[in-house]
Image (cartoon, rainbow, N blue to C red):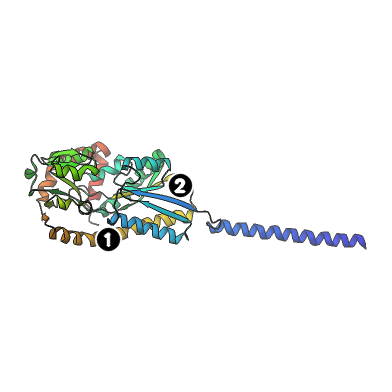
């Protein structure tokens, strides 16, 4: 009888142990399927040149709002505007190293992408997206990932680049001898040389004082940058040359991105797209308001001869485009950049 009782108790204990193991396995599988069941948290430092109030920065604020809400706060996004973390080049190095996770800037990290900024090559921000989403654009992004450890996941729109001056400019002939601040990129410098101007590369932080002291006569940037920098205080004219479209590129460290749960990766991609649409809307709203306020402050807007500007820069566009991409790809880009979308 005693042996039977011991055997019975042993069977009961074995059944209980098997049941417990089964429950534990099901629980573990459930947590694994949920993706975020571990409750692990992440932090994103997201830096930019843009200033608070600019549409591109408002897009970054929308990104932060969406990501933190959709991950229940498991991803915390810290925004660093106005080049707080260094120059664009320094921020890019930090993203490559993973000391910060994301940035938005005019530097996409790859020459093939940056040269889409050639004068009058792209008709709009939408045409940039058209090229970046193409097979050619996807090849460039794969190159970024493989060679530099970073990934472009979208753009934040900026307005077309315009020229500011203290004199009227209608044609390239009016720019003879005009000292214009330009970024330190060959396509900027050669563009303004083709327009008869005297381009002067200068860090953006030095532009206001350069205009005040006469080191340069004018500068070029999107209207929202002209406005936020207060250039209306020292420049009388805005020439709507619209010579380049150049959005801000949203770049993320690839290792950080791949180490996120898949659902969080998708949240970041979706949030980037939503932020772009939000910033585009804000940009459209702000352009009209900015123009009204600038005109009230005494700024005169000039509609120049765009055809003359486009023709004057044709040689720069063709020569650098073929050097960077080759004849065949350059012609594909020309077609996509001028397509009816």
Q: Quadrant of residue 203?
A: top left
Q: As drawn, is 279 to the left or to the right of 240?
A: right
Q: In the drawing, does residue 219 fall left or right of residue 266?
A: left
**Farthest residue, direction right:** 1
* Structural crowding at the residue carrying mark 1, measured as other residues with C-alpha within 10 Å and reported as few (<14), some (14–19) or many (≥20): some
Is residue 250 something one can see in this rendering?
no
Image quarter in which the C terminus is found:
bottom left
Residue 86, position as x, y percentages in the image: 33, 42
Query: What secondary structure is marked by label 1?
Result: helix
Farthest top residue?
323
Q: Nearer the viewer, residue 264 or 178?
A: 178
Give neighbour class at mark 2: few <14, some 14-19, many 20+ (Cα, 10 Å). some
Residue 282 tag number: 1
Mark 2 to mark 1 CA distance (whole Å)? 30 Å
Q: Tell me what residue is drawn at x 42 percent, y 40 percent.
A: 97
Horizontal arrangement in the rendering, residue 301 relative to residue 324 (left or right) = left
Q: Could you say where residue 193 lies in the image, as x and y percent from the top left?
A: 14, 38
Could you say which is closer to the camera, residue 291 or residue 270?
Answer: 291
Q: Position of residue 248 (x, y in %)?
A: 30, 49
Question: x, y percentage for residue 265?
Answer: 45, 53
**Who comes first in sequence, dot 2 or dot 1?**
2
Residue position for label 2: 256
């Amino acid at each position: 009888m005693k042996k039977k009782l011991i055997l019975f108790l042993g069977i009961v204990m074995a059944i209980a142990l098997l049941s417990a193991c089964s429950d534990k396995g099901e629980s573990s599988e459930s947590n694994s399927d949920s993706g975020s069941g571990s409750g692990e948290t992440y932090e994103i430092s997201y830096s930019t040149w843009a200033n608070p109030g600019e549409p591109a920065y408002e897009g970054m604020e929308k990104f932060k709002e969406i990501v933190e809400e959709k991950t229940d706060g498991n991803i915390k996004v810290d925004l660093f505007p106005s080049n707080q973390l260094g120059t664009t080049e320094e921020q890019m190095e930090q993203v490559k190293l993973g000391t910060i996770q994301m940035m938005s800037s005019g530097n996409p990290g790859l020459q093939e992408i940056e040269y889409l900024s050639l004068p009058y090559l792209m008709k709009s921000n939408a045409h940039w997206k058209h090229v970046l989403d193409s097979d050619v654009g996807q090849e460039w992004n794969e190159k970024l990932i493989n060679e530099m450890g970073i990934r472009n996941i979208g753009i934040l729109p900026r307005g077309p680049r315009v020229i500011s001056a203290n004199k009227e400019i209608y044609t390239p002939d009016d720019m003879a001898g005009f000292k214009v601040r330009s970024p330190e990129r060959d396509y900027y410098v050669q563009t303004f040389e083709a327009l008869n101007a005297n381009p002067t590369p200068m860090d953006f932080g030095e532009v206001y004082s350069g205009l005040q002291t006469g080191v340069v006569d004018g500068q070029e940037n999107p209207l929202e940058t002209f406005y936020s920098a207060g250039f209306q205080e020292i420049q009388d004219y805005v020439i709507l040359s619209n010579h380049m479209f150049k959005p801000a590129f949203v770049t993320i460290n690839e290792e950080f991105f791949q180490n996120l749960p898949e659902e969080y990766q998708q949240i970041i991609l979706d949030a980037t797209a939503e932020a772009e649409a939000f910033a585009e809307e804000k940009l459209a709203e702000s352009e009209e308001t900015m123009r009204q306020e600038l005109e009230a402050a005494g700024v005169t807007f000039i509609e120049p001869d765009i055809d003359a500007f486009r023709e004057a820069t044709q040689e720069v566009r063709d020569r650098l485009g073929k050097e960077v991409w080759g004849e065949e790809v350059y012609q594909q880009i020309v077609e996509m950049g001028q397509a009816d979308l």
